[in-house]
Image: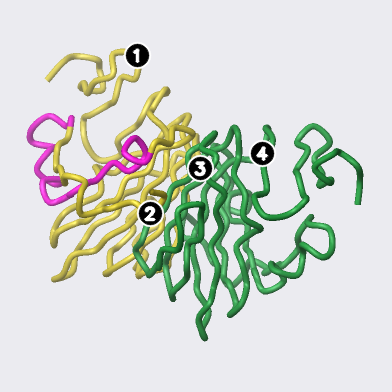
Chain colours: A yellow, B green
């Protein structure tokens, strides 16, 4: 069945972020759609942010493009250039290698939902505001000097 | 600027389909977002279907996954299994190699809009209802016996 039964897919708010960086995404409820739907050319996450939640810590990828389309509610895109309101239908792209740390924050009173397209990271991911790095070779999170949490 | 200025991107209703198969997509107005936004890991089309228009002739790809998320209006997904209504927020995936000819038709009175994610075809594409094939090696449309239109 090509139409995806979203309600049948469990929500999860898991994160690999070590404490205390995990707190900001505890209200980020995700459904991974690609594997459920049997596609693998790219990843697809259906993401609802509860009020106060962030899509991620502010970051950028050296080697993976990201694309987001808002489908419900309101949010704020925060990047090196400032703050941009987002509403349903808005589209945002984060080209690989562009050193512009970004995330999406729900600063409103209601939920917001978006679709995020990307690929499993196979390159360094840089975090703009905190002492965190994703080591893609070890597939885990470390301090910027490589030491574990 | 990560947020894409949709209004600044020209709409086009071009198609490679030969007549008479082009008629069904004349009311399909597309904006290609990936190249404008500087991303290349996957393709992104912002598509508005005018009343009566189809997303494509009914087809399936041997080697490319497709993903669609509705962002406004109403449409009908038509595939080998029947007809499925689509509204904003609905997500649809078409796995590569699944021989289930599909398209999205606007059978309503207003416009509908969706985002379609995929890759440039590098494999045969099969058309379910008409004498048409996409020859990816010649990057063009032909009759199913390989003869040109």
Gap in angstroms between the C-alphas marked 4 and 2 = 22 Å
Q: For the residues labelled 4 and 1, say whether their Cβ atoms are less than 8 Å apart.
A: no
**Highlighted magenta segment, given as a residue range:** A16-37
Q: Which residue is mark 3?
A: A95
Quarter-of-image position of residue A82: bottom left
Position of residue B112 relative to residue A97, above or below, is below
Question: For the residue labelled by badge 2, is the local secondary structure a helix, a strand or a loop?
Answer: loop
Gap in angstroms between the C-alphas marked 2 and 3 = 29 Å
Dot label at residue B121: 4
Q: Which is more toward the observer, A24 or B142?
A: B142
Same chain for mark 2 and mark 1? The answer is yes
Does residue A53 appear left or right of residue B133 in this picture?
Answer: left
Quarter-of-image position of residue B24: bottom right
Q: Nearer the viewer, mark 4 or mark 2?
A: 2
Q: Which residue is mark 2?
A: A3
Identify the residue at image location x=49%, y=40%. Answer: A98
Disc 1 residue crowd, few under 14, some 14–19, many 20+, Cα 10 Å? few
Dot label at residue B91: none
Chain for numbered disc 4: B
Question: For the residue labelled by badge 4, is the local secondary structure a helix, a strand or a loop?
Answer: loop
**Which mark is first along the chain, 1 or 2?**
2
């Amino acid at each position: 069945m090509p139409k995806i039964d979203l309600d049948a897919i469990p929500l999860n708010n898991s994160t690999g972020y070590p404490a205390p960086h995990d707190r900001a995404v505890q209200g980020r409820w995700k459904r991974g759609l690609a594997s459920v739907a049997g596609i693998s050319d790219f990843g697809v996450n259906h993401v609802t942010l509860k009020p106060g939640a962030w899509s991620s810590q502010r970051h950028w990828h050296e080697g993976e493009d990201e694309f987001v389309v808002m489908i419900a509610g309101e949010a704020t895109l925060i990047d090196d250039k400032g703050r941009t309101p987002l509403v349903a239908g808005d589209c945002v792209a984060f080209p690989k290698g562009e050193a512009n740390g970004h995330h999406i924050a729900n600063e409103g009173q209601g939920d917001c939902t978006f679709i995020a397209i990307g690929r499993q990271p196979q390159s360094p991911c840089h975090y703009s505001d905190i002492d965190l790095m994703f080591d893609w070779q070890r597939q885990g999170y470390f301090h910027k000097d490589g030491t574990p949490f």
